[in-house]
Image: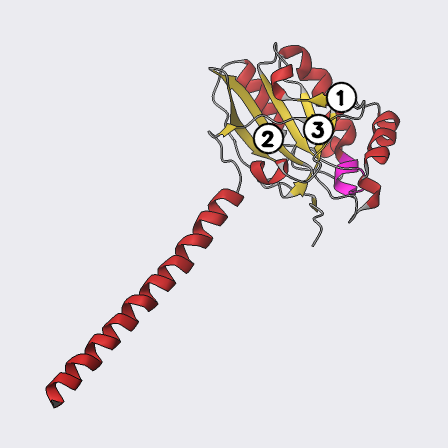
């Protein structure tokens, strides 16, 4: 009888250990899947298309640009001091590379309920003030920036069309000096797009984006 009790006790303990192991395994696996899906694109990944509202009221997708060889996707906004510092340089990127097949597509990822300066009407005003030559899209519902893995404004993703797919070729900052455009020594986006235009490898395909955090409603 005593032996039976010992066997039963051992059996209950074993079941408990199995349940505990399964629970912990599930806890460990689920966050891993979530973080993997939330981390965004890496260089070499295919970027999905999107459809977002432009400041002219029209919906814009990457597929609309039939002649484009790729894109300079810039997550930016109105209010951020870093974004403001880069506005003229982003306009210059579009003027330089749009004709070579790599237009700029700017996307405002911020929730205007958190940062009213980044509302749709304010986007229209800012684009006119700065003479934006490219689409300035609103990530309404904040669905696109997490797909890309953007964390800052500005945050740049250079894409290249390959066999009908938009492949990520560069991720990061515009250059290495947000404060003074005249004191820039590394022009990351220019170097990346120049390499793509010349069909050459990109020497630095990922850098750390410097800017304001994306404003999300809690």
Per the image, label 3 sits on a secondary structure element best described as: strand
What label sits on residue 157 in the rendered view? 2
Which residue corresponds to the image point at 80% horizontal and 26% vertical from the top-left? 55
Q: Position of residue 134 (x, y in %)?
A: 74, 21
- Residue located at (70% from left, 35% from top): 139
Q: Position of residue 138 (x, y in %)?
A: 73, 33
Q: Which residue is mark 1?
A: 58
Q: Which mark is residue 106?
A: 3
In the image: residue 84, left or right of residue 109: right
| First to last magenta residue range | 78-85
Q: Residues within 10 Å of mark 2 (few under 14, many from 20)?
A: many
Disc on the earlier residue, 2 or 1 = 1
Provide the secondary structure element on which disc 1 rests.
loop
The stretch drawn in magenta includes residue 60: no
Q: Tell me which corner region of the image, top left, top right, bottom left or bottom right, holds residue 193.
A: top right
The residue located at (80%, 40%) in the rendering is 118
Residue at x 62%, y 13% (from the top left corner): 101
């Amino acid at each position: 009888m005593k032996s039976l009790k010992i066997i039963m006790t051992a059996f209950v303990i074993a079941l408990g250990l199995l349940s505990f192991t399964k629970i912990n395994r599930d806890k460990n696996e689920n966050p891993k899947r979530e973080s993997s899906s939330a981390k965004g694109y890496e260089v070499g990944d295919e970027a999905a298309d999107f459809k977002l509202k432009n400041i002219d009221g029209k919906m814009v997708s990457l597929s609309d640009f039939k002649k484009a060889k790729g894109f300079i996707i810039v997550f930016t906004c109105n209010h951020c001091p870093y974004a403001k510092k880069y506005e003229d340089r982003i306009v210059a990127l579009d003027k330089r590379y749009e004709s070579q097949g790599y237009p700029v597509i700017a996307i405002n990822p911020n929730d205007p309920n958190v940062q009213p300066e980044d509302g749709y009407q304010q986007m229209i005003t800012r684009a006119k003030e700065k003479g934006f030559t490219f689409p300035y899209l609103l990530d309404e519902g904040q669905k696109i920036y997490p797909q890309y893995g953007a964390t800052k404004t500005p945050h740049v993703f250079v894409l290249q069309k390959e066999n009908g797919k938009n492949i990520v070729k560069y991720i990061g900052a515009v250059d290495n000096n947000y404060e003074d455009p005249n004191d820039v020594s590394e022009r990351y986006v220019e170097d990346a797009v120049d390499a793509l235009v010349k069909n050459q490898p990109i020497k630095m395909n990922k850098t750390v984006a410097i800017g304001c955090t994306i404003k999300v409603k809690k």
